[in-house]
Amino acid sequence: MALTPRLDIKQSQSLVLTPQLQQAIKMLQLSSAELVEFVAEEVEQNPLLEYDERDENEDRRNANNEDKQSQDASPEEERVKTADDFLQQSNSVNDQNDAPLDTDYSELYDDNSYSDNIGAIPSQNLGLNGSNMITGGAGNFDFAENSAEQKQTAAVSLKSHLEEQLILLQAESYEKVIIQYLIGLMDEAGYINEETNLIAERCGCSVEDIDRIFEIAQTMEPVGVFARSLGECLKIQQIQADRYDPAMAIFLDNLEMLGERKFNELRRLCKVGKEDFLDMIEEIKALNPKPGLEFGEEIVYTVIPDVYVKKSNKGSWFVELNNESLPKVLMNNRYLNEIGDRATKKEDKDYIDECVAKANWLVRALDQRARTILKVSSELVRLQKKFLDDGIQYLAPINLKTIAEAIEMHESTVSRVTANKYIATPRGIFEMKFFFTNAIGSLDSDNQYSSKSIKYKIKQLIDDEDPKKILSDDKIVEIIRAEGIDIARRTVAKYRESLDIPSSIIRRRMKNPVL
């Protein structure tokens, strides 16, 4: 066969990721705060975009009416509000040139990893109004109002408190400069975690000089700051109280023995009697291990949920997006008509067309992001109904694939939607990732159990154990397997350690102290 050049016609399909489509995909995984910041930049750069500053009272009344209708629904209508119901309320225009967001773009963006840690954040609507605008409304959800006082707590910072004292401190100028540097290194609890020799190297002085300057700084209030360890923090407080003697020095040098409840060994090291030793323990308990926490370091913001889950009077669960966490933007058509009539140059018309395209894209992207979040959260609520009704021990084992198959989306899309998002339930505010857990099988059926519910069961067993009959990991395995759950000893040990629960030996010492 001769090798000759030739022309062939080939038909193929390909997906072109425009910059705007890539940005829309990235918007899925933005948190509420990041989304507000992103939209603010777009509004600043685009003269055709503006915030919706209409009276929100009407939106709030509409939301209240919708909420009442949901609660008074007939039994046939009682169910989790799905995205299909939500989609029927909107007339947003689809751009035929835009590829769908539900595509695997893992090679472009990394999904946030899932952390399998148990624990919820302690607790505290989106309406689409058609066309190209996202509207809001406060709704009447039974949670505390997000007032400014609740969203932030202003207090004198530890840094400011120490800097005020530094001005009056009796020390050389270069010593004050180094103390100022130490204040910058201090964490919120009042500790310095940097190595002393590294501090000395950076400050251009000896370790001995740094130790001496530490002693000067440790005279400042609150007593115990500038400590490099817990023992040193307690030592500073005992020195200030004139209670630091050789026995107390040995006691503080061996604090780990106190944590392990090795009371007899520690008392023998201190060379004191039982009564004196008990007095020493009481003295240590009265000290403040984190003196810096008396001051506020910075403004603290509460977590703002992206989704609300509420139970109706009929007993069904329904989902609402949090309007107040979403930026409300629209395109100023009046201004567009005004400048459009005046534009005569080609570059002016091109600029206006570009602004129009960007404005339409942003509104559609916000619209689709809201719909996708609602769709995913609705399916989460449907699958975790028993958890909402009865507690964490009934948390269902689900993964990204389970949700993706149910709502016919790709796993990467679900991963982005659930990243940095929070859902408010009557049981508290949880990160959406919290509801995704590993599955543990059963011994005699096809049932599966959530790893988080198993952790909860282990914690309950240990909390309720008899101090005289401490449960070993093997015994915990025996108890759990008796309930039909297939679990290994190493799994129990791993879950126990992830909950920061000590071993049975240490727990026996903690619950049965002997002096």
Image (cartoon, rainbow, N blue to C red):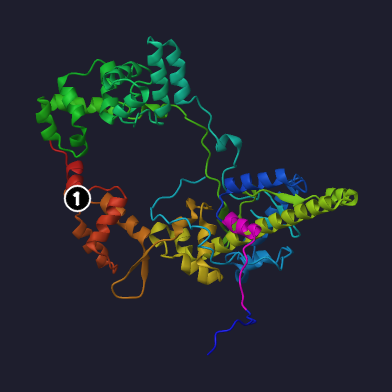
Q: Quick one: 142 or 185, which is closer to the camera?
A: 185
- Whether residue 21 is in magenta: the answer is yes
The segment highlighted magenta reads: 12-28
Q: Position of residue 442 (x, y in %)?
A: 31, 71
Vertical arrangement, residue 365 with respect to residue 16, above or below: above
Q: Position of residue 57 (x, y in %)?
A: 73, 46
- Kind of residue at badge 1: Ser
Instruction: Kindly tell me whether residue 67 is visible in this rendering.
Output: no
Count how many numbered circles sit on residues in the image: 1
Give the labeled residue for mark 1.
504
Q: Is residue 396 above or below residue 56?
A: below
468 or 92, nearer to the observer: 92
Q: Is residue 224 left or right of residue 42?
A: left
Residue 59: percent from the left, percent from the top?
72, 51
Q: Quadrant of residue 251?
A: top left
Residue sitting farthest toward the bottom: 1
Under circle 1, the secondary element is helix
- Could you tell whether 299 is left or right of 347 in the image? left
Q: Residue at x 21, y 27 (%)?
A: 252
Few, some or many C-alpha atoms within 10 Å of disc 1 (few <14, some 14-19, many ≥20)? some
Q: Is residue 339 left or right of residue 140?
A: right
Q: Is residue 277 magenta?
A: no
User: Image point 60% across, 81% down: which residue?
Assistant: 5
